[in-house]
Structures are given as C-alpha cells and as structure tokens.
Amino acid sequence: MVMIHPFKSIRPASEFSDKIATLPYDVLNSAEARELGESNPYSYLHIDKAEIDLPETLSPYDDQVYAKAASNLQVFLQKQWLVQDEQPLLYLYELTMNGRAQTGLVTCTSITDYTQGKIKKHEFTRPEKEVDRIRHIEACDANTSPIFLTYRKNEQIQTLTDEWKKSHDPIYDFTSFHEVTHRVWLVDKPEVIEQLVTTFAQDVPALYIADGHHRTESAVKVGQKKKEAQPNATDTAEFNYFLSVIFPKEELEILDYNRVLNVPIEADFFEHLETNFTVTKTDTGKPTQAKTFGMYLDGQWFALTAKDTILSDDPVDGLDVSLLQNHVFAAIFDIQDVRTDKRIDFVGGIRGMQELEQLVDSGQWSVAFAVYPTTMDDLLNVADAGKIMPPKSTWFEPKLLSGLFVHDLETKDL
C-alpha cells in the first residue's frame, strides 16, 4: 500500500491565483514563456523558466538561471504573492474542460514507495532533462512542479473528496488556458486528513505516473542526495517526499498523440503498407476504434486497419503506437529510435486533424498519421507488467497548471 503525506504548501494568495498559475515548464519553449512572462509579472514562469528574466543569449541551463529561479521564488514570497500554510494540509484540485471534470488529491508521495515499485512508471527518462529539474529543485529547495499520478478508483476516497467539495467553498476558482476551469479546495479538518492518509495506506496498493516521469526521477534523486547528507533525519523529513496530484484513473482522458514524417514516399509505398494493413480512402482521418489509423498523404486521407497477423496480446507490442512504429516507421522507413530521429515529430491531439493536414500541405512534412488514443487501462497494464511504453504514447489534457502548489523541502538553512 502507499503513503500520502500532508504538507505546508507554498501557494498563491487568493487574489493572485489566476495571474500566477501557468502552463507547465515542459510544454513551453523559452520564447513562448518569455512572451507570457513579459506581460505578467505575477506569472510562475518567472520561477519555473527563469531564463525569461535574463538575456536571450544566455543558455536556459546556465547557473544564473537556477539562481534567478530561487531569487524570484523569494521575491514572490516577500511580496506575498505566494504564501505558505502554517500546518500540513491536503488539497483538492479540480480541472474542468469541455464539460468533463477530474478531481485530484494534492499531497506529497513517498520516495521509498517509488524506489520499491509502488509508484509505477511507464516511460524511460533522458538524463539531460533530469539534470535541469534536479538543479532547479536544489536551487529553490522545493518541488516546484507537481507529478501527475493516478490510481484505480477507491470508493471511500471518492466519497470523502466528493463530500468535501459539496460542503466547502473553493479557495481558487478561475478559467485559464484552453478555457479550462481550475478550482482548489483546502482540506484542513484533521479527521478527514487522517481518513485519507489511512485509506491510502490500507486500500491503495499502487500509484501510477500519468505524466511527469522526468520530474519524478529528479525529485527522487534530490531527496536521496539530501537523505545521504542528513543520515540522522527522521522519515518524516520533507525531502523524503515529492509533490503530487493523484487522480482516479476513471476520471482521466488520454488524447491521441499523432505523428508526422519527413521521408521520401517511394512508388511501392502502398504495396509495403498493404502487407500488414487494409488501406482505403476516407474523408476524415480521425480513427474511431483501436487498431485503426488515419494517414494523410498528397491531400488525401486514408484509413489503415491492422491485419490480424500483426496483432499482439503483449501489453506493449499490442499498443496502437507500437503497431505503427514496428510495422510502418521501422519496417518501411527504418526509423528505429523516435526519440532521436529527426525525420519524425509528434503532434498532440488537442491540435486536431487540421494541424496534421497543414503540416503536410506546407511541405514541411511528407505524411501524417493519426492514432487512436492509448487508454488508461493500457497505461496501467504496461506499468503493472513492469514494461515501458514507446515514447509519446500518451497526451493528457487538461494540463495541471504550475504555481498553484510548491512543496518546501525545508533544507535551505541546514
């Protein structure tokens, strides 16, 4: 079973919540962040991507960037744009997009649970991305962005959170990027906090990383380093835990994560394709069921249906993204490593089919593939099997905003 840990969150003063909260650091490049930050001095991007307050010629990984992040965090606290709760608490974070709501429990989760495999992953991480967040966490002495976790629904937890929302007013309530409404409740009743902690400890066998593998690895490595430096610290020391938002998997939705290729299309391309797929012309590229794909080429959409001969019961090989990778990208175009091959790029489903058409019609890319979304059950099954999904298998919307919660590691003065 898993541990959750109430904490004294650093969070926006109520009047600044909508100004501070912003998109996560890893969905914006420096130029996009700079544009948002220039018009908004309250934006959490001044902390999360502090290069926006330094010369553009400076590397975003320069020592000055991390020092600026720490300095800006202190400025936000001094100006009381951010404040810290006096007692360890829990929080509820509801996101509503297109009429669909999901509510997560904001807490800290255990590094020990992660190292023991109770918090399960489904992606590999890249060391250079870990180093960036490690340096950011160390400079700020805080988990500055939450990890997006999920679990199989528990009725007692669901009842407790539903009743709390019905009987209390939110401390934040605003609409932001992509017209998503964000509401936050502060859970400050000791008995309810204890019930939630106990229920997770007794009835929830595992948590799963939905999004944020690099942040998780970074947070864990910082915590382990601090533990080594302070061997006499208790198990309740804040560095033994990392900031998380935990959602029941039944409330989450994975959008399609589509692909575009810049490759020569040979005369026998369709002949190769039809070895493993049934190919027909269609008016729309969006797949309506698993094991089918849309392909946009030369101004025409095609429907691709995987033949039985390539289907698999393996939790990874049977994924739609794996079928496309193994039997099209690798087999026909020799694209073996999609993380490093410059001939492939990925387009989040929130951009729609028109984005794929525009990318191909512009001549920048030669062919696009629309993929049926990976399901939450797929994700949990892969993680339970101890396996790893192909890169870019999942695209979660809506995104958790950064700046609403910061977890103080409380080691700055040690």
Image: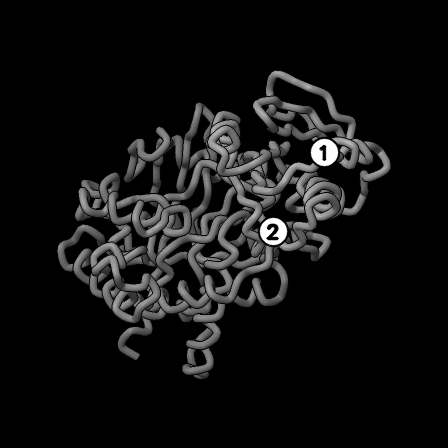
* Quadrant that contains the C terminus: bottom left
Which amino acid, by three-letter code, is at mark 2? Val
Residue in view at x 31 percent, y 64 percent = 59
SS at circle 2: loop
Mark 2 or mark 1: which comes first in sequence? Answer: 1
The local crowd at label 1, few if under 14, some if 14 to 19, many if 20 or more residues have their Cα within 10 Å, is: few
* Residue picked out by circle 2: 338
Residue found farthest to the left: 79
Q: CA distance from mark 2 to mark 1?
A: 24 Å
Q: Position of residue 40 (x, y in %)?
A: 19, 44
Within the image, what quadrant is residue 47 found in?
A: bottom left
Q: Position of residue 192 (x, y in %)?
A: 43, 47
Residue in view at x 41 percent, y 69 percent = 239
Colour scheme of the picture: one colour
* Residue 174 shows up from this direction: yes
On screen, residue 338 versus residue 234, left or right, reads: right
Q: Which one is closest to the eye, mark 2 or mark 1?
A: 1
Residue in view at x 48 percent, y 74 percent = 224
Image marks 2 and 1: residues in contact by CB distance under 8 Å: no
The local crowd at label 2, few if under 14, some if 14 to 19, many if 20 or more residues have their Cα within 10 Å, is: some
Q: Position of residue 202 (x, y in %)?
A: 60, 54
Front-most of residues 27 and 325: 325
* Residue picked out by circle 1: 267
Note whether 142 is above or below 207 in the view shown: below
On screen, residue 232 versus residue 295, left or right, reads: left
Q: Position of residue 41 (x, y in %)?
A: 17, 48
On screen, residue 157 versus residue 91, left or right, reads: right
Residue found farthest to the front: 267
Note whether 310 is above or below 119 in the view shown: above
* Residue 154 shows up from this direction: no
Front-most of residues 338 and 164: 338
